[in-house]
Every structure is written in C-alpha cells, then in structure tokens.
Amino acid sequence: MLTVKSIHTYYGNIHALKGVSLHVGEGEVVTLIGANGAGKSTLVNTVCGLVKPAKGVIELEGEAIHAHATEDIVRRGIALVPEGRQIFSTLTVQANLEMGAFLHRRNGRQVREDMERMLERFPILRQRSHQLAGTLSGGEQQMLAISRALMSRPRLLVLDEPSMGLAPLVTKEIFNIIDELHREGRTILLIEQNARAALQIADRGYVLETGKVVLEGEGAMLLEHREVKRAYLGKGARDIWEA
Amino acid sequence: MPIWEPKKECMSEDELRQLQLERLQATVNRVYRNVSFYRRRFKEMDFRPEDDLTELRDLERLPFTTSQDVSDSYPYEMFAVPLREVVRVHSSSGTMSNPRVVGYTREDLRTWSGLVARILTAGGVTQDDVIQVTFVYGLLTGGLGIHYGAERIGASVLPTSVGRTERQIKIMQDFRTTVLASTPSYALVMADRMDEMGVDPKRLSLKYCICAGEPWLESMRREIESRLFVKVTDNYGISEIMGPGVAGECLEQHGMHLQEDHFLGEIVDPATGVVLPPGEEGELVITTLTKEAFPMIRYRTGDLCRFIPEPCACGRTLRRISRIRGRCDDVVVIKGTNIIPERVGDVLETIKGERPVYQLVATRRGHRDELEIWIEVTEHFFYDKMREQKALLDTMRQKVANFIGISPRIRLVEQGSLERVHGRVKLFVDRREH
C-alpha cells in the first residue's frame, strides 16, 4: 500500500530523516517507535505532504506521491490524525465530522451514512454532537479526530501520537479502538511514544534512531527485543560493552 | 506441498526488493554504529550509509568481507551486540590460523530455527516425521541448526550426531526414522553398512533425506534415492552467514531457494569481484539482512554456483541457486571439513624445520572420503632405520590430524614424482571419483 524508499527530509539545517525506507501492506498496522527527536513525526509529515523530502520516493499503491500537494495526497487516500488532535474546537462535533468528509461533500447521502456509522461506533460523540468540540475531554477529542479522519474514507490512516496527554485508562480505550479498526481490515501507520502499547497491537514495527531505521520486525518480536526493551520499555538501563 | 511461511516465501518481487532495501539499510546502519571493522572500512572509502545506500544496487560499492577478515577478528571483534546479548556461539570448520567465531542473539536463534523450518518443510518434513540428525553436534552449526528447525516444525528429533553407523542403523530401524538429515557421503556410508549388515532399506520407514554439508553430484543423489528409497533434497548452509537454512531445495529438486528476505545474494566473478548477470556462474556473496549478533556485509563464501532466474513450480518466489559446483579459492572440502593445503604445509614444516615437497590427495574408498599426504623423500625426511622413519610419519600424521581434525595417511614418494604445474607442485589433487 504505502512504500517509502530512502527518504531524506530537512528542517532548515537539521537533517531529520536520513535515508529512511519502510512499507505498510494492505490491512496492516505498522508502528514507528523511537525517542523524541528520532524523526517519527517528520516521517508522518513527509508522508502526508506537509514537508517535502529532499530525496527519496514515497509511493501509494505504486504511484509516486512525494511531489504532490497535501490536498492531493488526502484525495489519494491518506488521512492524518495529527499529534495533539487539532480538532476545530470552535465548531460542533457534527461540523467537525462534516469537515472530515470534505472530499465527499457532493455525495450527501454517503456523508450522512458515514456520519451515522461514526456516531454508532462512538456513542459519546452522538451525545455531544451539538456541543463545541473544544468542550470535549481529551479522550473524546481523540475519538473525534479519528472519526473525522475516517470520514474521508481513507485507504491509509496515519495516527500521530494518539495517546499523547491522555490518562492511562483513556489511552487504553484509544488503543482498543485502533485494534478494532485493525480487525476491520484498515491499513494504519501508527506513530507512538508508548512503544509497549503500540507494539502490542501492531503487525510490524520500525525503530527509528536519529533519523535512521536501525531495526525492523514483527510487533511481538520487537516487544521482546532486548534493545527495544532497554531503550523504549524502560528495562535494564545499563549499557556496558563487555566485548 | 506445504510451505512454512507462504507470506514470505511467495512474496512478489517488488515486495521483496522493498523489504530487502529496508533491512539492508537497518543492517548497514547498525554495523556502522556497532562494528569498528565496518565503520573503519566505510570511513576509509567515504561511504556514509544514510547518503550512499539508497538502492540495493549501491551495495556493490562496498568492499567484500573475507573469511580472513572474520578470522582476524577472532574471537568477538566483529560482533555487533554486547556479549551479554549473545546466547549462543558457534565456530566454523577450517584451518585458518584462527577459527571463525559466530554469535547469535535470542532473536537470531528464532530466525534461524524458522529458516531451517522452511527448508525442512520444503524437503518434505512435517510434524508427523521422526528425523534423525546425523550432523555433528557441537561448535559446528550443522547439528544444532537442523535440530531446532525440526523441533520448530514439531517433528520428533533424534539427535544421534555423526558416527557409530551400526547404532545409527539400529536406531533408524527401531525408532522408525522417516527423515534422515545427513551429508550425502554419510548417507551412502549408511547404505553400504546396511548392505553389509543385511538390512533391507525397503523395510525402513525412511521417506526423505535432507542432504547438506559438502559439494556433491546429481549421480550421488540418484544413488541415495535408489538405495535408501527416499526423496533427497540439497541444502546450503554456511556458518559465517548462519548455518543450515540459508538455502534449500524444494521437492521439485531443481536448485535451492535462497532465503532472500534474510540474505541478499550476489554472484560475482571470483577473479575480478564484478557482479555477474543473472544465470552466470560465479562465487556466491551473501549479505545478511536480519542477523543481529554477527551481521555480514558482502561475505565471500568461496562457493561456486549460479542463480536460476526462472520461477519454480513449487510456488515459492525466492530465487534459487544451483547446486554448489565447488570452491573457487584454495579451500578443499574433505569429509565436510574445510582444509587449506598451504596451512598443512605450515604444520609439516614445524616438525623438522624444513618444508617438505608435499601434495594433498583426496581419495574415496567405498563412499568414504580419505585424505592422503604424499611427501617427496629427501635426505631430510629419510632415515635408515625403519623405526625412526615410522616415528616421523606418525608424528606428521598426528600433527596434521590435530590441526585439521581428520587423520590423513602419509605416503613417501620418489623425488620429482609429484604432479607439477609450471614447475610448482600442485598442492591438492582430487582423486575422488565423481
């Protein structure tokens, strides 16, 4: 579905991504883990066209998209749930969802059906549908952000730090939602600080370190990987080289 | 026939190339960070992984790693993880000054058993089989490598290791072995012994034979098949890369599928090092894509083969390599042991302080390989007294046996009688009939 080949991205003088390659297959949940500043969000922004790569290729189902404008990338089927949710806080929940269906605005029936489906999935949003989005709790806002992205009927859903700033219980709920979406067969690229939770639901994962991929593997394998445990799961912090 | 990991073994070419690129970049990033040998080399040639490795083709710019490099880094210099994370150590056969030591993390072992499960499945093994593993258990990778792969499948494993042939045959009868894992020559040794013992192979439960460990010929395969009433598959493993499981034949019996999602193979001209077009025969060079403890970048295996570009009828899309036709360096393989003739001379030289004129001769008695060392008689190596002469030959035999691990026969021959090429004695002559 998504293929990234040897991408280099700069922020001014900072070389944020140094030749990163990865792929997300149809129906897969793939997670990127890494410390702050490793380049996770830069990768998301590059995939979604918010930053242009200096070098490399990004393909969505075989078509190069890295040179396209962001709105064109959305039209081709990538939807982003951004870090910090970024819902339209002064609009109602319903209006937020309608904004998500902007691409399909000419097909009122489809939009109504999709919206009904979202409200069914997230009953709390139905209760709050006429409330201003800014008045929702963090977890509710995240649900709204996810449903808003789904309203565009994406082929690839990109989630950037969905658990950020949420209480542990709420985080758990959000991950349950992602897991459900996975079981529905959706394709998801998940960027997450909470490596353990992410790896538990991911098919595969990549470990980014200072802009480079240093490890790739199945979620369960990475979860058990000593290097990952030490660096991201907070186990055994000693790093002494005997050899 | 079943396929162990169809998602991986039947990948489309595009998917495979993308996965290889991702894994190659991760591997190169890791060795650059963790292995001083590679970091030094890359820096010398001004190769920066992040900038200079954007396509698989870019790998061709990197220098080869040779068995000498591995030997020089004895024992742990080339490990890419702290020893604490290494859970197994093996060492290769061979007569380098230092053996080649390889390590495995827990994850490496998991990958390894998975890959062996793939080749065993390809060779017909299922969880219902009883597999007798007659490879050496120990520092060499053969025994334990096959062992854990067979357990992974769920087969019943008989870790008999090598030797004591009569006992092997008794076990084979009594335990109703269905799969024999063996070197081709040992499979034939067993067949010979069965003849001598009056055991009828038809009354055994054997179905398949998983062969590996030495270069062999199609005629040997046919002989094993007709004498033991089994289907025989060819397999390729090399300790520096992983051990058994690197490539294995399916029941189509036409070339060994290289596990390309874990190993990147190239065929190069042994003389120039230039990568050859698909289908041409040359030296197999392998880069590991997932090894953690002991990654190898462009390792020269010294084995001659070619890629078979045509698709295989079994459905696996991983490319096949042809049967290993032999070695392209001065390593000779006798009884599954790698021997460098030059080094044998070094040993002989230590005995009397002078290097004799010598030649290694491989012969075959029945199905057993034998090593003879022919030495031209000079005053230095000649005694009037029979006893002294015999003592000298015994010393030579023992010293060489200690060094290479197999006991040779020493023969003294007339001066000037050894075969010479351009005035120099050929150090190795193969008289095994193929």
Image (spheres, coloured by chain):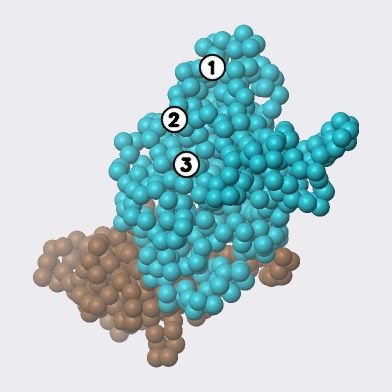
Q: Quadrant of residue B404?
A: top right
Disc 2 with disc 1 on a shared chain: yes
Kindly report the distance in space between the C-alpha atoms of the residues bearing marks 2 and 1.
24 Å
Q: Is residue B135 left or right of residue A155?
A: right
Specify the label residue B324 is tagged with.
3
Q: Which chain is disc 2 placed on?
A: B
Q: Colour of chain A?
A: brown
Which residue is pictured at 63% across the width and 67% down the height?
Answer: A230
Q: How far apart, in angstroms, are the residues tagged by discs 3 and 1?
A: 29 Å
Q: Secondary structure at mark 1?
A: loop
Badge 2 crowding class, 10 Å Cα cut-off, few under 14, some 14 to 19, many 20 or more, is few
Same chain letter for marks 3 and 1: yes
Residue drawn at the location 52% of the way across and 56% of the way down: B300
Q: Which residue bears the numbered disc 2? A: B218
Mark 3 in CB contact with mark 2 (< 8 angstroms) = no
SS state under label 2: helix
Residue in the foreground of this view, choosing between B434 and B188: B434
Image coordinates for residue B4, horizontal then vertical, percent: 44, 39
Q: Colour of chain B?
A: cyan
- Label 3 or label 1, whichever comes before in sequence order: 1
For disc 1, the marked residue is B205
Q: Residue at x 63, y 17 (%)?
A: B193
